[in-house]
Amino acid sequence: MVSARLALFLALAAMPSPLLARDYGQQGIHFPIIENDLLKQIKSKLHAMEASGEIDRLNQKLKAQTIARVNRPKPVAGLIRADKTITRLFDPTITLQADIFDHDGRKIWARGTGVNPLDTVPLRAALVFLDGDDPAQIEWAFAQKPKTAKLILTNGAPLKLMKARQRRFYFDQGGKLVKHFAIGALPAMVDQQGRMLRIREFALPGRREQNQ
């Protein structure tokens, strides 16, 4: 009998009591949920920009900026004109971080091995780094031998110089090469000496001529 009463009490206790249910009414101001279609908003904005000619103006601006950047890339920061001539050697050897396999799956180099790229791919032409806005550096570069050296600008207008000099110029975008070789002053030259790279920075006579 006691168990039956206990079960009945628990069942009644689990049922929601109408005495505990309350209507708290409306609290604050309510607004209807209205959400505009994002794609429609974007299309509407584009149509308005096209009608006003803003898209064409933006395209022309982007085109002009691109042409300007190609004609004169962003200069490599932190470089100065050399005030003394220095020579040092650079070891290009790298330590492999993983095993290297050939196309047949055979291991050709083990992880931890030191590999010198010059053993398989020699530096066929010297690399000459220049400030293209310094006429003295340009004249110095063209006086160097051999004439096969690759002329790499860190500042200046490569296309303009190619047209004027009838010689290919490269540009060290982002300064990746000068950072790799730790070059801090110009002009500089990198060439191969056996299994090492020789890096030279040259002090030129006279002061840099400023372009007007």
Image (cartoon, helix red, strand yellow):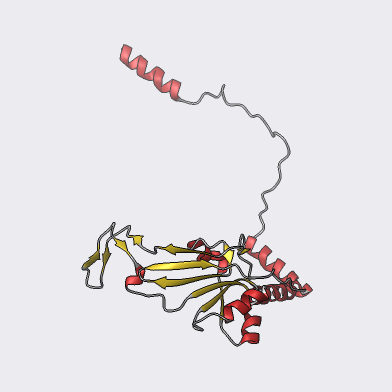
Left or right: 197 as drawn, with respect to 62 = left
* 207 relative to 150 in the view: left or right: right
Judge by depth and name the residue closer to the eye, 172 or 91.
91
Q: Quadrant of the N terminus?
A: top left
Residue at 36% x, 63% y: name it.
93
Q: Residue at x 49, y 82 (%)?
A: 146
User: Could you tell me residue 81's position as x and y percent?
Assistant: 63, 65
Q: Quadrant of residue 197?
A: bottom left
Q: Nearer the viewer, residue 36 or 83?
A: 83
Q: Residue at x 67, y 58 (%)?
A: 36
Q: Residue furthest bottom?
A: 166
* 134 sits to left or right of 4: right
The number of discs equals: 0
Whole-percent x, y for residue 130 in the image: 59, 72
Please identify the quadrant where the C terminus is shown: bottom right
Extreme residue in the front direction: 205
Furthest residue toward top? 2
Q: Position of residue 151 (x, y in %)?
A: 55, 77
In the shown orientation, is residue 194 left or right of residue 141? left
